[in-house]
Amino acid sequence: MKKRTIRLHCRELVEQINRLIAQMTLAEKLGQLTMTAADYAVTGPLITPVSEDAIRSGAIGNLLNLYGAGPTHRIQKIAVEESRLRIPLLLGFDALHGQRTVFPIPLAEAGLFDPAAWEATARLAAEECAGDGLNMTFAPMLDVSRDPRWGRIAESPGEDPFVGSAFARAKTRGFQSADLAGTNAVSACAKHYVAYGAINAGREYASTDMSEAMLREVYLPPFRAAVEAGVAAIMPAFTDLSGIPMTAHVHLLQNVLREELGFEGVLVTDYHAIAELLNHGVAGDLAEAAALALKAGIDIDMMSDAYRLGLPQALQRNLVAMEEIDAAVRRVLVLKERLGLFADPYRRGRSDVSVTAQSRALARDVGTRSLVLLKNDANILPLAAPKLAVIGPLADAGGEMRGPWGGAGRSEDCVGVLQGLTDAGLIVRHAPGVAIDTGDLSGVASALELCADADVILLCLGEAALMSGEAASRAYLGLPGAQQELADAVFEKAGGKPVVVVLFSGRPLAVPSLVSRAHAVLAAWFPGCEAGHAIADVLTGKVSPSGRTAVSWPRAVGQIPIFFGERPGGRPFNPKDHFTSHYSDVENTPLFAFGHGLTYGDFALSNLRVEPGNPLRVKVDVENRGARAAEETVFLFLNQKCAGVTRPVLELKGFGRIALAANARGTLTLTLPPPEGRAELFVGPSADLTSLLSLSI
C-alpha cells in the first residue's frame, strides 16, 4: 500500500482532513465515531459484533479489547488496505496499571508520592501497549474518591486533588511521551470526567450531586492538570451530576472542558453510555440520545451503536446538523494523524511483548515501595526468625495479585507470597485455612496446627481482586467470608507468638479489631506481578517500607466519607464540649490518617522555616534516629485564615521524600506559592494533626 503522508503544517493538515471528510459518505463518517469491542472476554457480550466486512465498509472505525502484534496488524491491514478511504483504526485497551507487566493498583502506586515513578510505570505500560499494536489506553483514571465502599477507588489516585493532579501530569507524560507519533507512545484517555468518585452511597453507577465549589476544588483539578499536560482523549463518566448525565452535559463538556480548560482532543464515551441516556430518562429513543451526546461534544460512541443507528434518524428529524457530525469526525482524524497512523499504520506492534527481567525489576521496585506498614509493635518487623507459618487464602494466590483491571497480565507471570518468601530463603509452612469468600471453616484446624512449630505467624488475608474495581461496591468493609473467624482462631492459638497480617485489598478495609490484635500489619493492596518478591523484600528487611496511604482508613463504615480536607464548621470537635461535631460511638479520626506509613527508620522533623520568594521555600530538618537506613515522606499542608469562604483545616500543597542512612540528618525543601492573607503552614509525615509542625506566615 502507498502510505498517506499528512504530517503537515497545521493549515495543510486541516485542508487535508477536510478533503478526506468531503469524500466520506454518512455511514463512513459515523464509522469514525464508532468504537466496538473486538473481544468480549473483558467487558461482556458484544452489542454489535465486529466483522471484517464492517471495517472494510468503513462502518466501524475504532476497536477496543484487541491486542497483540498479529491480531492488530491483521485488523489494521483490513482498514487501511481494503476499505475505500483507507483510514486506520484507533485500537484501545485498559492498561490502568500495566499492560503485560502488572504494577500495583493505582491507589497503591499513588502511595509512593513519587511522580517520577508514576511516569516510569506509565512509560513502560505504553511501550508494551504499543508493542501489542495498541495506540490508545483508557487511562489514567483520575476520579478523586473519599468513599472506600466504591470499588473503583482501587483505580484512583486517592482522596486528594493535589495528588490527583500530580498523578494526572505524570501519567499523561508517561503514556504519550514527548511525541505522540512515536512508536512507543499511545494516546492517554483520562477518565471519568467528572465527579464519578462522589457517587451516592458509594454505589456503582449511582447519581452524584454537589456544589459548584466542591466540583471545582476537589474533582475538576486532576482533569485540568491532564489537559494542561496535553492529554489526547478524555472519557466522560457514566453518571449524572445534579440530574444531567455526563454523556449529555453540554455545560461541563463544552463550556468548561473545551472552552474554559481548552481541551481540543477526542471525547470517547464509556461502555454503552449513550444508549444509557434512555435509562437516565433524558432521551426518548436512540436518535434523541445520539443527538444529546453529539451536541455535548462526544466524538466516539463506545459500544452502544447509538451514532451508527441513531444519528441518521437525528439528521432526518433536524435534531443535529451535518456540521456537528463533521466536527466530531475531524477531531477523531486529527488524533489518528497525531498518532502517526496515516504516515505508517503499522508503526506499533512490531514485535511480541512479554514480561522481561527489566520490566520485572521496575515492578518489584514499585511494588515494594507501594507497601504500607500500618503497624509494627515492638519492631516485630523486619523478621528476625526465618521459620514461618503462612496462613490464609491469599498466601498462594499469584493471580489475585494483579488486582482489578490487570491489563493483559497473565496469572502465570505473577509471583505469590509463598514463592516470594521461599525465594528469600525463609522456611515456610502453609495452609489456607479458609477460602476468600465462603463460610467453610473445615480447613481452620489444619491451619492452626502450623502455629506450634513457627517462630512467627503470617496471616495473608483480604479481598479477591474482583471484589474491587468496576461494579464491585461493598456495604460492609470487613474481611470477606470466614477470614475474620480464621484470624480470631489464630490469635487465640498463637499464645503470644508474633502474628503479622499482610492485608490485600483494593480499598481501605474497616478492620479495627484485626489491627488491634496483630503485632504488625502490612497493607499490600494488590502489588502486581512481583507481589511475592516485593512483600518478602519488606518483611525480611531487605528494603525498608516507604509506602504511604493515599486515602484515609475508616474505623467504621459509618464514618464514610472520611478525608483529611474537611472544613472546620462552626462547632469543631472539642472533647470538653458535648455540643460539638462528633460521633457518640466512635472517634472522629480515621484508624489511619492520609499519608500514614511506617518505616524501619525512626524519623524526627524539626526547625520548620520559610525563605521568602515566589514561590516560598519551605524547609524542614529531618533526622533518622533509627539503626536502619530508610526513606521518609513529608507533606506540606496549608490552612488559609480569614478567607472569604471557609477553607479546609488542611489543604495539601506539596510533598517530598528524603532517604537517610542510620543516624543521619538532612534538610528537605518544598515550594509553595505565597498564600493570599494570613495562613498557617503544617509539615509532617501524615495528615494526623498531632504529628505536624506548624508555622504562621
Image (tube, grey):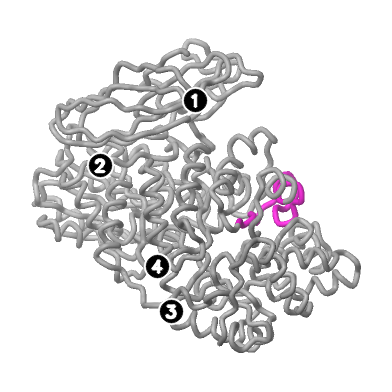
User: Residue 340 at x, y = what percent?
Assistant: 54, 69
Q: Do callouts 4 and 3 mark residues in contact (Cβ within 8 Å)?
A: no
Identify the mark at residue 650; answer none if there is no mark.
1
Q: Earlier in the sequence, mark 4 or mark 3?
A: 3
For the residues labelled 4 and 1, the Cα–Cα distance comes to 39 Å
Q: Which of marks 4 and 2 is nearer the N terminus?
A: 4
Q: In the picture shown, does residue 280 fall above or below 407? A: above
Residue at the spot of label 4: 128
| Amino acid type of the residue tagged 3 in the rendering | Ala
Residue at the spot of label 3: 69
Q: Is residue 465 or residue 440 the one in the foreground?
A: 465
- Assign a secondary structure to mark 4: helix
Residue at the spot of label 2: 545
Q: Which of marks 3 and 2 is nearer the N terminus?
A: 3
Magenta region: 234-253
Q: Which quadrant is home to the N terminus?
A: bottom right
Q: Which of marks 4 and 1 is nearer the N terminus?
A: 4
